[in-house]
Amino acid sequence: MTHKAKWLLFAPAGLMVIGAGACLVSWAGALKEKGAPAKEWVPAGTAALAVLNAGVSLFGHGVTENVLYRLKEKDQLEPA
């Protein structure tokens, strides 16, 4: 798989997972505000933060692949 293909896969996937994680964090916060027991909202919040951080990681990997793609493209365009 090329750097460009990885970039075009990981960056949007990361953004979607970040959005899902943000929604889950909000949901866990709402559980806490409603007075749910800690045994419910703490695991929910922990899982939500894990999803959010996974999204940041995926997006970061996409950015890395973009940089590698651009460097490779630049090297191919420059005369030797």
Image (tube, rainbow, N blue to C red):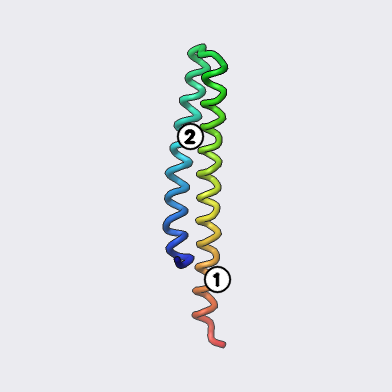
User: Which one is in front, 78 or 54?
Assistant: 54
Furthest residue in direction top, as rendered: 35
Residue 79: which numbered mark, if any? Answer: none
Mark 1 and mark 2 lie on one chain; the one further toward the N terminus is: 2
Q: Local crowd at mark 2 within 10 Å, few (<14), some, or many (≥20)? A: some
Residue named by callout 1: 71
Task: Examine the image and state in which quarter residue 50 appears.
Answer: top right
Q: Secondary structure at mark 1?
A: helix
The x and y percentages for residue 19 are 44, 39
Q: Is residue 75 left or right of residue 20?
A: right
The x and y percentages for residue 61 are 54, 55
User: Which one is in front, 80 or 56?
Assistant: 56
Residue at position x 55%, y 52% in the image? 60
Furthest residue in direction bottom, as rendered: 80
Residue named by callout 2: 22
- Quarter placement of the N terminus: bottom left
User: Which one is in front, 78 or 22?
Assistant: 22
Residue at position x 54%, y 13% in the image? 37
| Residue 6, above or below 58 | below
The x and y percentages for residue 70 are 51, 68
Q: Secondary structure at mark 2?
A: helix
Residue type, label 1: Leu
Alpha-carbon span between mark 1 and mark 2: 33 Å
